Image: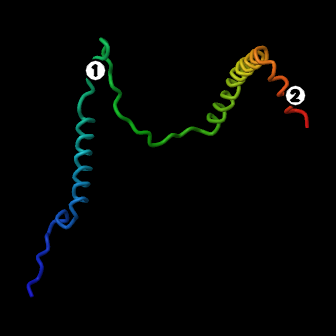
Amino acid sequence: MPEPTLSMTVDDDLPRTIRREREARDREARERQAAAAAPVLPREVDGEFELRAPAATIVDFDVPLGKLAMFFVRAVFAAIPALLVLMALLWVLGHTLQTFFPQLLKMKILIYMP
C-alpha cells in the first residue's frame, strides 16, 4: 500500500474556512499597519478642514489612590448645586401639576391614609 504524501506546509493542512479566516486577519493587520504608516491628511468638511485623530488604544490607567479620592470628593461637592437645581425644578413641576390637576392632591391623601 502506498504511503500518503504529507504536505510540508502548515497552511495546506487547514480547512478552507480557517485558511480564509487567517488570510482575512493577515489582510486586516496589513491594512492597519499601512493606515498607521500613512500620514494623517486634513479632509474638508462643510467648507472647513478637519484633522482626523490617529487611532489609539488605552492599555493602562495608573492613578494614585490619593488623587483618585480627591477627585471623587470634588465630584460630590460639584454635584450638590446640581441636586439643588434639580430639586427646585421638580418642586416647581409638582406645584404646577397640582395647580392644573387638583385631583392629584386627593389621590395623594388617599395614598397616605392606611
Identify the image quadrant of residue 15: bottom left
On the image, the x and y values in percent for residue 35 come to 25, 35
Classed neighbour count for the residue bearing mark 1: other residues with Cα under 10 Å, few (<14), some (14–19), many (≥20)? few
Rendered residue at 81%/22% (across/down) = 103
- Seen as rendered, the residue at the extreme top is 47
- Which numbered mark, 1 or 2, is in the foreground of this view? 2
Mark 1 lies on residue:
42
Answer left or right for 69 relative to 109.
left
- Seen as rendered, the residue at the extreme right is 114
The residue wearing badge 2 is 109
Q: Residue 74: image x %, image y %?
A: 67, 27
Element marked by disc 1: loop
- What kind of residue is marked 2? Ile
Indicate the quadrant where residue 87 lies: top right
Name the kind of residue labelled 1 in the image.
Answer: Pro
Q: In this image, 62 relative to 46: left or right?
A: right
Q: How many marks?
A: 2
Vertical side of 89 occupied by 4: above or below: below
Percent from the top left, x then y, of residue 114?
91, 38
Q: CA distance from mark 1 to mark 2?
A: 65 Å
Quadrant of the frame with the N terminus: bottom left
Name which residue lies at 90% across and 34% down. Answer: 113
Q: Determine whether the residue tagged by mark 2 lies in a helix, strand or loop.
A: helix
Q: Residue at x 76, y 20 (%)?
A: 94
**Mark positioned earlier in the residue sequence (1 or 2):** 1
Q: Is residue 82 left or right of residue 20?
A: right
Query: Which residue is at the front of the view, 68 or 44?
Result: 44
